[in-house]
Amino acid sequence: MNFINPFILFGLAAAAIPLLIHLFTRLKSKTIKFSTLQFLKELQQQHIRRLKLRQLLLLILRMLIIVLLVLAFARPALKGTSSGVSDSAAKTSAVFILDNSYSLGGVQDGTSFYAMARNDIKNLCQVMRPGDDVHLVSAIDTTLAVSRKTYYDLARLQKDVDEIPIGYRPTDLNAALSYAVRLLEKSDNLNKEIYIVSDFQKSGFNPDSLDFSNSNIHFYGLPIKNNSISNLSVDDAVLNTTILQKDKMVKLAVTISNHSFRPSGNNLAQLYLNGNRVAQSTVNLGAGESALEQFEFIPDRTGFLSGLLQLEEDGIEYDNRYYFTFYVPQVIRVGLIGQSTPDDEYIRLALQPTGQRTDFYVDYKSVEELRFLRPQDYDVVILSNLAGLDKSGIDAIRDFVTAGGGLLMVLGENCEIRAYNSDIMPALTLPKILSTIGSIDNRQGSFSLGQVDLHHPIFTGIFEKDSPDFQKPQFGFALRCEGMVNAVSIMAYGTGDPFLFEKRVGQGTVMVFTSGFNLHNSNIIHSTIFAPLVARSVAYLDARRKNDPSGRRVGDLLTAQLPATAIGKELTFHRPDGSEEMAQPVITGAGATVRYAGTDLPGIYSLMIDKELFGQWAVNVEPRESQLETVSLEELPKNISIAILESNSNISQEIHAHRYGKELWKYLAIGAFILLIVEMLLFREKGEVPA
């Protein structure tokens, strides 16, 4: 039991006043012997006994009345959170955690759930008393400037609450609670309380990982119940077409989910490309279902293109849009590094057939010129049947690939295995060469091409059938590499050894042919697959360089490798809301990079170098925020206990009841009133009796 006004208990001493009055005013009977009144003696004794009994009852009643009145003014309470008799007079430090995630952006009966959350915060301000200090923390971002303020003026806090907009980051109540606890640990006030106004989504709250069981902080939760609304979301969009070309079909796979507890049918999904609608589809989903919808479109231009997949309006509008961007090359710059072997000419002809317009610009360079290679010089570099590279050449190639460039290596009969294994392959983290297969003069016979991964992007659109029938080339000489650790075999010989494999190195990609293209090695140049195989491999390497398949989410860091020519120029990020922010390059030994952390809005972010477009990123909301399933606060583990407050009730009274428990002063006051009536009746009866 707690007492809200414990100092009133000193008034219990007043219960002794009736006793003192009784003792000091009691009259002692004087004995007078009178023979004629002797017969009345027995009657007098009976009257005295009755009088003493009434006096004793009146004394007890008066003392009980005083005790009950004092206890009533002390305001006792049962099952409160206060830990001592001084809590009621002590100051309070409180943290208000406001969930401003987009899952509260829905509307019910004309009022948004976020407006309800704001109103609950304002109602909480009425509970605080002069001298209390309050912190306001966002449930999606504890780094906001408002989270570093301490409020003593609650009117200012209410104004700041109105200025906090709905954010696009996902809810992280664990981080917000941990931050709030750290704030209160610095406070010297006896009463410490945390109030959480949120929808308590499971995706944003993991109470099992928290342990506040030894804390003297009291937790209160005000649930915002928004899980009855209808909500569909676009969770992801992936380009199934890797090699992108102007006027060629592009396929897009889009993931759409229904987060409602009832089916949703005939929902229109529309695809926009550079602001123009290019496709649409109708989506039907059962309760809690997800589906993969396929869209097709044809790019009508080269360069960076941006797209948008949009759903119809529903309960939450913030997850109805998904942005994406990609790059369609106008020309692919290829640096062909060779030693004037037939392989060089075959590669050039595959990329630039005589008399035909192609998408490739081929610049032939000698091995000696490789040391001057800069990452911005080419999109793809081809090493054609080289004997080896010196240290400067190896460093140049490694820097080119790690910066995002594409590298195509053709290993022919000129390759010195020892030089490759000691320097080149380790520098690029590629599998080492174990031995040769066959011989250059074909004395050991020939071997053919075996298994081919026809689902690889370089074969998309080459064959009309799923199981193409083409003449497989014959090989007389090849190099056998060790196991494909972190590498992917695309084409293999009949022996199972890879003929073509790829490996991701840094931000770039390396593809390796383990046999040369001249007639001493194979007859592949006579195969109908040769020219498209080389051209598609180069286009694939360029696509991996220009189009980053990883989806960016709000709050992610954007990074870009800059060419040396960009140093000293104006770098500007164009944001989705039309604003611009200047950026500064970070120069290291590996080159210049630019980083941007201000991705607080979904949409397209563009990097401009002296007002020319250099790069684009699509940033979207986190799909888990669209999941409306909530945590049951009644079933929380023992390591954290949250008292539930109802938003539509009198919050002040509820908090008072949780703080101090159920007050008993009314019952004590009623008891004192009843005893007072009894005392009056008993006293009146006494007065009617003659002395």
Image (cartoon, rainbow, N blue to C red):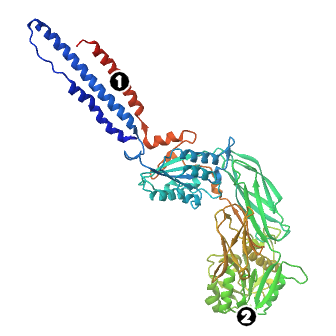
Query: Looking at this view, is 70 or 506 the one in front?
Result: 70
In the rendered view of the protein, which quadrant contains the C terminus?
A: top left
Q: Which residue is mark 1?
A: 676
Residue depicted at 75% across the width and 76% down the height: 542
Q: Which mark is residue 302?
A: none
Indicate the position of residue 225 as horizontal and vertical percent values: 60, 44
Q: Which residue is mark 2?
A: 368
Amino acid found under the numbered disc labelled 1? Leu
Indicate the position of residue 611 as horizontal and vertical percent values: 78, 73
In the rendered view of the protein, which quadrant contains the N terminus?
A: top left
**Disc 2 packing (10 Å; few <14; some 14–19; many ≥20):** some
Indicate the position of residue 637 as horizontal and vertical percent values: 47, 51
Residue depicted at 75% across the width and 63% down the height: 578
User: Who comes first in sequence, dot 1 or dot 2?
Assistant: 2
Asked whether residue 526 is in view, the answer is no
Query: Looking at this view, is 129 or 353 the one in front?
Result: 129
Q: Quadrant of residue 352?
A: bottom right
Measured in 3D between alpha carbons, the distance from the residue under mark 1 to the one under mark 2, in whole angstroms, is: 113 Å
Q: Residue furthest top?
A: 36
Q: How many marks?
A: 2
Is the residue under label 2 in contact with that under label 1 (CB below 8 Å)? no
